[in-house]
Image (spheres, rainbow, N blue to C red):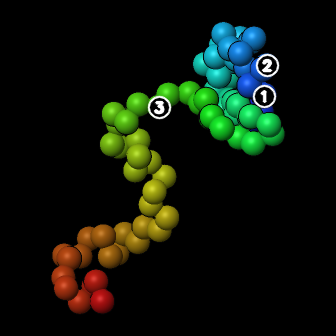
């Protein structure tokens, strides 16, 4: 979920908004004259577990084909 605040409100409530971003994981967009200028979001480490990136990525699994050796004809 995204929350929008003006620069003036951000300036007066920055610490409170930072705590909300940390605690709730929501994004805050700071606007200047109604136009988005800055996005504040929780930091996500790029050092994620590689296996977590693959979780739920298999959409179809055919056991019959899984037990056969891989050949060039299967790719075509």
- Check residue 9 in the rendering and tell me which mark sits there, or answer none: 2
**Image quarter of the C terminus:** bottom left
Viewer-side residue, 56 vs 33: 33
Give the secondary structure at mark 3. loop
Q: Quadrant of residue 18?
A: top right
Residue beneath the point at 34% across and 75% down: 64
Viewer-side residue, 35 vs 59: 35
12 left or right, relative to 55: right
Give the mark nearer the N terminus: 3 vs 2: 2
50 left or right, relative to 58: left
- Check residue 44 in the rendering and tell me which mark sits there, or answer none: 3
Residue 52 in view: yes
Give the mark nearer the N terminus: 1 vs 3: 1
In the depicted structure, whether residue 47 falls above or below residue 69: above
Give the residue pinned by disc 1: 5
Q: Quadrant of residue 36?
A: top right
In the depicted structure, whether residue 15 falls above or below residue 42: above
**Callout 1–callout 3 Cβ contact below 8 Å:** no
Give the secondary structure at mark 2. helix
Q: How many marks?
A: 3
Residue beneath the point at 70% across and 31% down: 30
Indicate the position of residue 2 as horizontal and vertical percent values.
73, 36
Residue beneath the point at 61% across and 29% down: 40
Residues at marks 3 and 2, CA–CA distance in whole angstroms: 26 Å
Indicate the position of residue 19 as horizontal and vertical percent values.
65, 13
Indicate the position of residue 22 as horizontal and vertical percent values.
61, 19
**Image quarter of the N terminus:** top right
Q: Viewer-nearest of labels 1 and 3?
A: 1
Residues at marks 1 and 2, CA–CA distance in whole angstroms: 6 Å
Q: Residues within 10 Å of mark 3 (few under 14, many from 20)?
A: few
């Amino acid at each position: 979920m995204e929350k929008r605040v003006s620069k003036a409100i951000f300036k007066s409530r920055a610490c409170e908004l930072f705590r909300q971003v940390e605690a709730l994981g929501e994004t805050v967009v700071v606007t200047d004259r109604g136009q988005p200028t800055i996005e504040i979001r929780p930091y996500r480490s790029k050092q994620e577990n590689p296996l977590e990136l693959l979780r739920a990525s298999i959409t179809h699994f055919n056991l019959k084909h899984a037990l056969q050796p891989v050949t060039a004809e299967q790719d075509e």
